[in-house]
Amino acid sequence: MSAARPQRPFDTAVVAARDRENVIVGNEIVRHRLVSRVIHWSVAVTFFVCVFTGMPIWTPVFGWMAHLFGGLTVCRLLHPWAGVAFFLASGIMFVHWIGDMRLEPGDREWLGPKAFAYMRYETEDTDIGKYNGGQRLFFWAAGLGAIGLLLSGLLMWFPRAFPPLLLEFAYLIHDVTFILFAVAIVFHICVGTAAEPGTFGSMVRGTVTREWARLHHPRWYRDVISGEEDRRR
C-alpha cells in the first residue's frame, strides 16, 4: 500500500489575495487582488495579440508573425477585433484603477530626471504611495493611447466611409501611437522584472514582501502597517 502524498503548505497570502488587498499576511503584503490581476493580464494578452497580428500587416519584415495565426488573411480579420477587445479591457482597467491613479502635485517631475534617479536608487522619496508619479502618468498616457488606437483603427477598418485625407491622418496616428505604446510597454516590462525584482510577483501571486514595499512605496507601506494596527485594536 503506497504512502499518502504529502500536502503542500497552505499559502495563506495567495488565498487572501483572491479578494483582498492592502493587508499583511506574514512577511507579505497583498498588493493586487485577483480581479485586478485578471484585468491587467487581459489588457496584456489582447495588446500582444494586436501586436503579432498587426505587425505583419504593417510591414513584410514581420511577415513571419502571420504564421502564428494561420496567415496574413487571418491576421487582417483578427486584428481589428483584437483591437476592440484591447480597448474594452483597457476601459475596464481604467475604471478599476482610476481611484488610485489621481495625479498628485509633483507628478510632472517624473517626466524628467526624477524617473531615472529613482531607477538608479539615487533618490529617497518617503512620500511615494501605492503608485508613484511615473506609474500614474503611464496609466493616463496608456488610456489616451488606447483611445487613439481605437479611433484611428476604426477609420482604417472602414476606409470607404471617410475622406482620403482623414484616412491618411488616421494611419499616421495609428503608427505613431503604436510605436510610442510599444516603447512604453518594453520599459514597463523591464521595470517590472529586471529593474525592480519582486514587482512581477505582485501581478502573479498578488503579493510583495514587506521589504519591497518599504523600499519602493514607503508611504503605502506605512499606511498598510497603520491600518493593520488599527484593525487589531
Image (cartoon, rainbow, N blue to C red):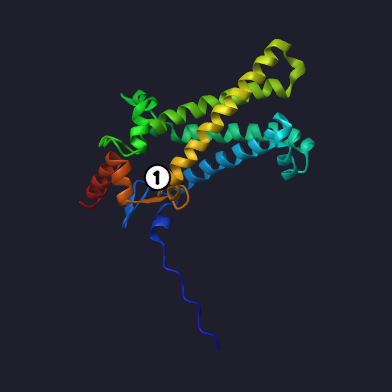
Give the percent coordinates (x, y) of residue 17: 42, 52
Q: Nearer the viewer, residue 79 or 173?
A: 173
| Residue that sits furthest to the left in the current view | 233
Q: Is residue 228 above or below residue 72?
A: below
Is residue 207 visible to the viewer in this orientation of the structure?
A: yes
Residue 53, by quadrant, is top right
* Apparent side of residue 146 relative to residue 115 in the rendered image (left or right): right
Residue 9, by quadrant, is bottom left
Give the percent coordinates (x, y) of residue 29: 34, 51
Amino acid type for the residue under numbered disc 1: Glu
- Number of residues whose C-alpha sits closer than 10 Å to that of mark 1, classed few (under 14), some (14–19) or many (20 or more): few
Q: Which residue is mark 1?
A: 196
Q: Nearer the viewer, residue 175 or 2?
A: 175
* Apparent side of residue 15 relative to residue 212 in the rendered image (left or right): right
Give the percent coordinates (x, y) of residue 180: 54, 27
Give the percent coordinates (x, y) of residue 83: 64, 32
Q: How many marks?
A: 1
Name the residue located 54 percent from the left edge and 44 percent from the top edge: 41
Q: Secondary structure at mark 1?
A: loop
* Apparent side of residue 80 relative to residue 140 in the rendered image (left or right): right
Q: Nearer the viewer, residue 3 or 173?
A: 173
Name the residue located 49 percent from the left edge and 32 percent from the top edge: 94
